[in-house]
Image: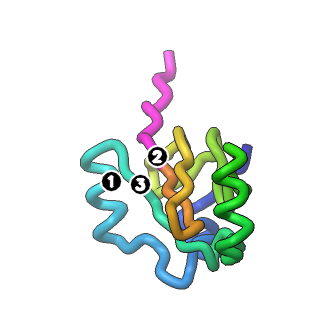
């Protein structure tokens, strides 16, 4: 499990990291999806990807994995799922973590 700040995540998922507007929407909705292309995942070999898919295998998770945490200001999100796209990219489903209650 990795714990990343928003800036650290931006370095991993460039060249177009999630914007302020994205994070504002995700915080309001308490969930969202971070998408990256195959060049970020390193899965640009289409033939190898198709062979893996035929065998029922998937590629590496890429820059995030289930259980990873992303801290955005006072809020934290957890990666709850990873989906491989047809092009070899990934979609990471994230959900807001409930704040701890002291007491």
- Closer to the chain start, of discs 3 and 2, is 3
For disc 2, the marked residue is 94
Secondary structure found at label 1: helix
Which residue is situated farthest in the bottom direction here?
15
Q: What is the crowding at mark 1: few (fewer than 14 residues within 10 Å), some, or many (at least 20)?
A: some
Residue drawn at x 54%, y 73% as measured from the top left = 37
Distance from disc 1 to disc 3, alpha carbons, whole Å, reads 8 Å
- Closer to the chain start, of discs 1 and 3, is 1
Secondary structure found at label 3: strand
Q: In the displayed structure, would residue 21 be above or below residue 15?
A: above
Residues at circles 3 and 2 in contact by the CB criterion of under 8 Å: yes
Magenta range is 93-103
Q: In the displayed structure, would residue 99 be above or below residue 24?
A: above
For disc 3, the marked residue is 33
For disc 1, the marked residue is 26
| Left or right: 26, with 38 as reference point | left
**Residue 48 shows up from this direction:** yes
- Residue 19 position in % (x across, y down): 38, 74
Mark 1 or 3: the one toward you:
3
Q: What is the crowding at mark 3: few (fewer than 14 residues within 10 Å), some, or many (at least 20)?
A: some
Dominant SS in magenta: loop
Secondary structure found at label 2: strand
């Amino acid at each position: 499990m990795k714990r990343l700040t928003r800036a650290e995540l931006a370095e991993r998922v460039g060249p177009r990291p999630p914007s302020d507007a994205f994070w504002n929407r995700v915080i309001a909705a308490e969930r969202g999806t971070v998408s990256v292309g195959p060049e970020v995942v390193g899965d640009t070999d289409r033939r190898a990807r198709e062979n893996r898919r035929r065998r029922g295998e998937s590629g590496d998770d890429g820059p995030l994995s289930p259980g990873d945490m992303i801290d955005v200001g006072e809020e934290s999100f957890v990666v709850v799922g990873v989906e491989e796209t047809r092009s070899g990219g990934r979609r990471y489903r994230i959900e807001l973590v409930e704040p701890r209650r002291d007491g």
